[in-house]
Image (cartoon, rainbow, N blue to C red):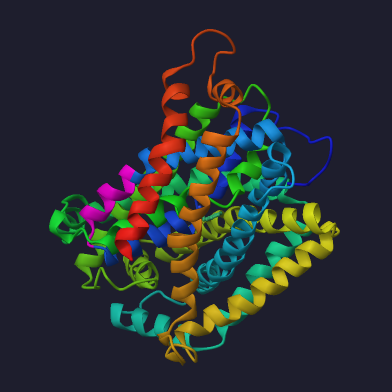
Amino acid sequence: MKQSSPRSLFATRLGVIATTVGSAVGLGNIWRFPYEAGVHGGGAFLILYIAFILILGVPVLCAEFALGRSTHRGIFGAFSSIRPNSRWRWGGIIGVVASLMILSFYSVVAGWTMEYFIVSVKGGLSGLSDAELHASFSSFLVGWRPVGWTIVFLLINYFVTARGVQKGVERISNILTPMLFVLIIAFCINSLLLPGASEGLAFLFHPDFSKITPSVVIGAMGQAFFSLSLGIGVMLTYASYFTDRTPIVRSAMITASLDTLIALLSGILIFPAVFTYGVSPAEGPTLVFEVLPSIFNRLPGGMIWSALFFFMLFLASLTSTMSMSECVVTYFVEEKGMKRKSATALTIAVAVVFGILCALSFSSLSDLTLPFIGSFNIFNFFDYTSSNILLPVGGILISVFVGRIMSRSLLTKQLSSRPSGAPSFAARVIPFILSWVAPVLITIIFLVNL
Ligand code: PHE
């Protein structure tokens, strides 16, 4: 989206939903959710994740929407237009750092989807046994191709963001995201027919509360923020293009429901296969890429399905990384007075350097040891720090700012769908959650984890 002034606002409500869903739905749902749920014991993680989406996710999303729409600015501008020259603007630094970190490791995984797309088009996976599929992914990871794909993905991102052709990509993805949805449902049905289906579903839906530890709670909270693109001003920036008639609470609920639904469906797609093909659910970041090819390989016309799926996943990733780059580029343009093209070039250059380090975390840098820190994996460090720490901290700042500093009558007006009359239920509850529940709850979770 271009930073033009006066801003061109979203023409339709569907446009609003499609763009926010475009940012929210991506690798977070299809790659990160199953891997986090797998590492953190399945059912108990799922319940916590859904609770966090409801208690924190929807209110913080409403806060970002309200702040963005009422100020029509990015996160820095939004803070400073309500509190000029205050320290609040520095909250935006968290957003920029987190966006850059996420962009870096996310692009590595998006690169894996590109590799699988090309390999599927060439028919390279058909006829391979599960062991051979596994071996081919492992040997791919230790070669140079992941580094190459990370760079290619980031360059595509550069062209899309620098030229302001996001609108075009959005239009394509508005058609393809519903198709991805239909495709996932079809693959879910296939997974439900696998011999490991009941074990997989029990793992995902049967909570074992004894498995809840502070790290499971932190992981579920981080996943809720990550999946809804919250805490760093991405949704806030998009909301600065909303019109006064966009219903904030309803848009937030629709975005959160669709996003959660897609995460759940990918769980239903992955876990039956995990138990059928004897993969460990706690495999980590590579889980989904080890399981999906085994599923596709057994379908009639499997390579066509595989190519389609990975292409759509690539596009879904692109609409998410577009929103991250936008957040960083807006900072350089608005705060540092840079031109859009140079700001994008700088953003992508930094992401390329970090992205290469993240890509090498699965090969030459896999057992990096640092003084004072010990063994260290850059990919995991970027993933953990940004999602589990920076996004929730940003969430506290946005909640406190909107709940306590922004004028209450302005907030109530933003949250109410009816312009006059008594404030709706949501308009009464959400300010309370933002001023008290969210900051206190997130702080307690951090303290317990320490
Ligand atoms: N929500 C995106 C996804 O699920 C990832 C994302 C995180 C995008 C943070 C923007 C900001 O894939």
Q: Along the horizontal axis of the image, is 8 left or right of 412?
A: right
x, y percentage for residue 115?
Answer: 53, 73
Start and end of the magenta stretch? 41-51
Q: Main secondary structure of the magenta part?
A: helix
Q: Along the horizontal axis of the image, is 102 left or right of 51?
A: right
Up/down of 183 relative to 417, above or below: below
Direction front: furthest residue: 86
Q: Which residue is located at x 36 percent, y 79 percent?
A: 133
Up/down of 7 relative to 286, above or below: above
x, y percentage for residue 72?
Answer: 72, 36
x, y percentage for residue 411?
Answer: 57, 27
Q: Which residue is located at x 15 percent, y 59 percent?
A: 199
Q: Which residue is located at x 26 percent, y 60 percent?
A: 271
Could you say which is closer to the camera, residue 77 or residue 281?
Answer: 77
Up/down of 148 relative to 392, above or below: below
Could you say which is closer to the camera, residue 309 or residue 231?
Answer: 231
Q: How many marks?
A: 0
Q: Which residue is located at x 51 percent, y 89 percent?
A: 143
What is the quadrant of the C terminus in the image? bottom left
Q: Is residue 208 visible?
A: no
x, y percentage for residue 177?
Answer: 52, 46
> Is residue 250 covered in magenta?
no
Q: Along the horizontal axis of the image, is 279 left or right of 445?
A: left
